[in-house]
Amino acid sequence: MNRTDTAPAPDTGALVFRDAQGEDVPALAEVIHRAYRVGADRSWTSESELIKGPRTTVPALRELIAAPGGRLLVAERDGAPVGCCRLEDRGGSAHFGMFAVDPSAQATGVGRRILAEAERVARDHWSAREMRMTVISLRAELIAWYVRRGYRRTGELSPFPYGELAVGTPVRADLVFELLVKDLAANPAEQLSAG
């Protein structure tokens, strides 16, 4: 099992980061579903008013774990996953996606720690100079959260994958992604203190 080094944080308890394994998939699928698809009253990251149906599937997660050039990073506490993200090495940059924090662990600093760990992995393991991600442009609160952590809005838009069942069923016809980018060469200590 490939584990990355991490230290406990007083605001979230002892989080352990590691690469996902096949046996993690059912629990991760449930964490991802709760983070993206439960009502907004229980998860501030929910997309339930924009997209219905599962955010991912067990077979899709198994494919992500097996795919070369990427990692599905798990954050666990007391042996149970509380969050995850997908990282892809894109030669000089890394792509960040499928970021999920179980609603029971949201607003405790877990998401900020997962993001910081993902940036560290991209920088230290792949020598990535920047982290890139796409976010649904209507998700103003989520985009603002990333901006507070050093990401900049590029204004570069890309189409939502309508018709791909693996991402759910959109309930609106105006969904697009916006590219956000962060320079990973900046001082990591400054990035963590950004709130």
Image: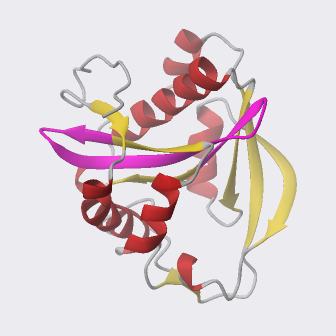
Residue, x 50% and y 71% (percent of image)?
47
The part of the chain drawn in magenta is 75-96
- What is the number of callouts on the image? 0
The quadrant of the image that shows the N terminus is: top left
Q: Position of residue 132 (x, y in %)?
A: 72, 42
Let me know if residue 78 appears in the view. Answer: yes
In magenta segment, residue 53: no
* Relative depth, front residue between 37 and 28: 28
- At horizontal 60% and vertical 34% (from top left) the residue drawn is 148
Quadrant position of residue 17: top left
Q: Judge whether 103 appears above or below 169 on screen.
A: above
Above or below residue 37? Residue 112 is above
Q: Is residue 165 left or right of residue 158?
A: left
Q: Residue 76: percent from the left, percent from the top?
A: 25, 40
Q: Nearer the viewer, residue 38 or 130?
A: 130
Percent of width and height locating residue 169: 56, 87
Q: Quadrant of residue 59?
A: bottom left
Residue 142: x, y in percent?
A: 56, 53
Q: Residue 9, located in which quarter of the rendered image?
A: top left
Residue furthest toward the left?
78
Which residue is more in the foreground, 52 or 16?
16
Task: Look at the image and say whether residue 80 sits in the magenta stretch.
Answer: yes
Is residue 103 visible to us here? Answer: no
Magenta stretch: helix, strand or loop mostly: strand
Please indicate whether residue 107 sits to the left or right of residue 8 in the image: right
**Left or right of residue 29, residue 133 in this image:** right
